[in-house]
Amino acid sequence: MKIYGFPLSPFVRKVLVTVKEKGLDAELVPSNPTQPDEEFLGVSPFSKIPGFRDGDFTIADSTAIVTYLDAKYPEPALLPAAPEARARAVWFEEVVDTILVPAGAPIILNRFLRPRIFGIEGDQAAALAADEAIKRPLSYLEGVVGEEWLSGDFSIGDISLASGLRTLDYAGASLDAAAYPRLAAWYGRVTARAGWQAAAEVEANIFKALGI
Ligand SMILES: N[C@@H](CCC(=O)N[C@@H](CS)C(=O)NCC(=O)O)C(=O)O
């Protein structure tokens, strides 16, 4: 199995954590979506990370990859069987992918990627506006997070949200436990899991190898 991309991307991390939660292994192939090589374009035709290969099968998009992984390697299930729980797990995944991550993207771009990776000044006004923009999805999530997981058993919703929050950590926008205490407690539960820790180790090694 191969995952193409960098785990700074919450979408790449989502796939990596999914693989580890299922007790599987995958090679993480560093791939730059702005400078795609042929192998990467072969699995991700629009040059987005993550791309994925399992034997002869290739697919891109984290949601599509996780859907494949959960069907092919069903234990433990990360898409719940009950219709309501499954729908809510996908809902939380989508809240992160389409609302929280786009709202927080200027924080990553202007406080991490531009100054630390591209060596150019970040747009601080854009980052400050994004600090405000992420409050709405975070407040919503604070209001709905339960005593254990987001949708019954641990699911793709939990993985997706924790992956998004972890990316914000890199830009110094870590979750404020005073403002979001229930979410912070839930994040602690996710990051204590063996699957998360195994993925975090892979991620740390990549960042170390890149000197970041
Ligand atoms: N819906 C896609 C989103 C993938 C995506 O937008 N990845 C970003 C990195 S976080 C990317 O490849 N951006 C490069 C570009 O758009 O050129 C997924 O879930 O995989």
Image (tube, rainbow, N blue to C red):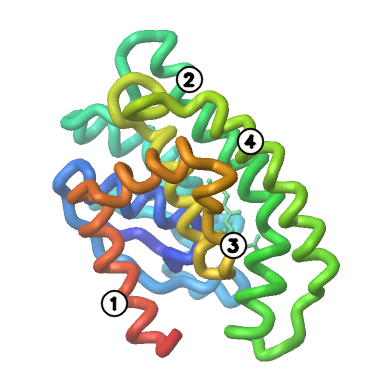
Query: How far, Cα to Cα, is label 4 from label 3?
Result: 15 Å
Circle nearer the N terminus (1, 2): 2
Residue 16, horizontal then vertical, whole percent: 33, 54
Q: Residues within 10 Å of mark 4 (few under 14, many from 20)?
A: few
Circle nearer the N terminus (4, 1): 4
Location of the C terminus by quadrant is: bottom left
Q: Are marks 1 and 3 in contact (CB under 8 Å)?
A: no
Secondary structure beneath dot 3 equals loop
Q: Are marks 4 and 3 in contact (CB under 8 Å)?
A: no
Q: Residues within 10 Å of mark 1 (few under 14, many from 20)?
A: few
Give the residue type that dot 4 points to: Ser
Q: Which mark is residue 205?
A: 1
Q: Are marks 1 and 2 in contact (CB under 8 Å)?
A: no
Please state which of the two labelled residues, at mark 4 or mark 1, is closer to the viewer. Answer: 4
Along the horizontal axis of the image, is 111 left or right of 128? left
**Residue pictured at 55% horizontal, 53% vertical:** 176
Which residue is label 4 attached to? Answer: 139
Circle nearer the N terminus (4, 3): 4
Residue 145, horizontal then vertical, whole percent: 47, 28
Q: Residue furthest right?
A: 125
Residue 209, horizontal then vertical, whole percent: 34, 86
Query: How far, Cα to Cα, is label 2 from label 3?
Result: 26 Å
Vertical position of residue 78 compared to residue 36: above or below: above
Circle nearer the N terminus (4, 2): 2
Of residues 35 and 162, which is closer to you in this image?
Answer: 162
**Residue pictured at 67% horizontal, 54% vertical:** 104
Give the residue type that dot 1 points to: Asn
Give the residue type that dot 2 points to: Arg
Location of the N terminus by quadrant is: bottom left
Which residue is label 2 attached to? Answer: 88
